[in-house]
Amino acid sequence: MNLGAIIHRTESEMAYLCDDHTAQIRLKTEKNDIYTVAIIAGDPYSLRSRPDLVPFYQQPQPMKKIMSDAVYDYWQITVTSDKSRLGYAFIITDQNQQQIILTDKGFIAADDQSMLEDMNTYFRMPFFQVIDRFKGIDWVSKTIWYQIFPERFANGDTTNDPKGTKPWDAIVNPKWDDYYGGDLQGVLDHLDHLVDLGVNGIYFNPVFKAPSNHKYDTENYYEIDPDFGDKELFKQVVNAAHTRGIKIMLDAVFNHIGDKSPIWQDVIKNGASSKYADWFHVHDFPVHYTPTDNFEFAVDANYDTFDYTPHMPKLNTANRQVQDYLLNIAKYWVTEFDIDAWRLDVANEIDHHFWRRFHDELQQIKPDFYILGEIWHNSQAWLNGDEFTGVMNYTYTGAIIDHFINHHLNQTALLETLSSQLMLYRDATNAMMFNALDSHDTPRIKTLSHDNMDLVKQMFAFTFMQPGVPSIYYGTEYGMTGENDPDNRKPMVWETQLQDQDMYQTMQQLIIFRKQFATIFAKGSLEFGTENGMLWIQRDDIVGYFNTSQHQQKLDVTTDEVLLSNNFIDGTLLTDGFVICRQTI
């Protein structure tokens, strides 16, 4: 028995409240090392104050091995307490039937009666603090997001086109500084397209006043960029979307600001005497950098920036004035325009203290407000219920791409990676994660798939069955292509002859499917595995099979109800095919 690999942490994703009276408890052990795990759990005070009761340590409950990754097995059980408090320990039996108990005091012998009788031996959930519980948001779990890069979605008003705007062309390879005239009127004009597609959430890339086409270099957080329209038009978009049952999420860049901002310009002009001097991380004055051939790169800026971009000086969010400034902005767009969510750019580079304030003040305004962080790595520290609701689930969807397209992960390695990621977080947290296969930061999925649309459909079907909420990048429903930025930001394909209508119909069907079983995908059981060269995933009574091998596979689903399929012919699942069924009992 490898004791060093037996791990449990209280007040974490390994011990948390599911509801007011129910706790979820997990333990991880070395893969294939442990035969069984049982929990002994109950009211710790009963050991001292209730001699009339059978001691809870005499009533073990078996835990279920729910997942395994490359290193660990994960065991889980749900425990209730009518006293809203819990003491617990784990009875662990290895493959050789050796037994030991893991407690808060460490490992003890299975027959150590004095330790078992001591209430202080046990791991504790001292009181079920409902206010601290991570709470998922019901509407988010039912949302299929549609990401719009405003400058490239639709040009609805040519009178606000910036100088040098190019003709709309969906197959052009745009340059980083090109403009095509996309605006909010274009979004308003095409809302019924989103209704027809079936999505019910819009994630906007930045819409605030900024000199670039991507608007991540914010100049004024309180104004809609005039290239896109104005605040009155934005309010029309929000209201029209809400009327259609579509939620609105804006992209907030609070880590840094654009160097054209009056605030930064004041620092440039007045140096250490600027009233904003402490709003940034300036090492000495005056601020300076040496320009290079790459507009977005400088190696010697004497102030902290996003990446090496001298035009994006980093804000000092430890400064109370900066906090107030940014929080007032965040609240303004909620109170004045009724947006439903913020997506927070470069969220991991801002301090936790600020994000806790952000969370609390936004929740006071709108208790079901969705706070989504852009983080590309382990996000446990941000997902404990007092900062973010979810994060951009790049590691999770990256593993899917690495198996289905890049073949860097075989089937077993894919499932191990997904298991490892899921076990980092609470179940309710996993349901809030944002699952995007492509975006403005990545090559388009059709391009990654070498134009194999069966593979694209298969990946979306697999992703739509995962915990977390799916996102569709504008134009992916029509099979748009594009390499990395800026090629992934082509103007939207509105010409019917250039649209992949078959892909569009598949996406519609997937969205209907996801909505129909939203509760299962948010809260249902999850199992996955491999069988005869196929991946399978099961959510309650819904099971999907995905042939990611190089050979067709026979599959008997005659007793099942087929919900969706592609490349499934007469009981044979072809390469890059999938079939999703509802099992009959």
Image (cartoon, grey):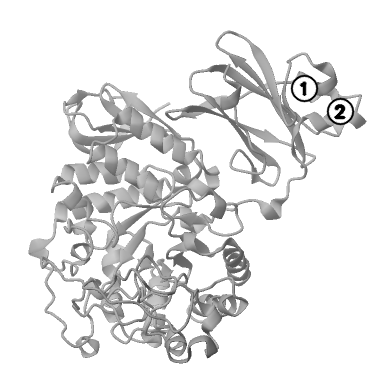
**Image position, residue 159 (x, y; %):** 22, 90
- Residue 180 lies, with reference to residue 4, above or below; the image says below
Left or right, 370 with respect to 122, comes to: left
**Image position, residue 508 (x, y; %):** 27, 53
| Visible residue check, residue 391 | yes
Rendered-image quadrant of the C terminus: top left
Q: Residue 57 carries which label?
A: 1
- Residue 269 lies, with reference to residue 540, above or below; the image says below
Marks 1 and 2, the one that precedes in the sequence? 2
Helix or strand or loop: what does disc 1 sit on?
A: helix
- Residue 31 lies, with reference to residue 194, above or below; the image says above
**Location of mark 2 (residue):** 47
Rendered-image quadrant of the N terminus: top right
- Mark 1 closeness class: few <14, some 14–19, many ≥20 residues within 10 Å: many
**Image position, residue 410 (x, y; %):** 28, 30
In the picture, residue 309 is in which quadrant? bottom left
Question: Nearest the camera: 182 or 12?
Answer: 12
What is the residue that sits farthest to the left in this orientation? 497
- Residue 266 lies, with reference to residue 25, above or below; the image says below
| Visible residue check, residue 543 | no
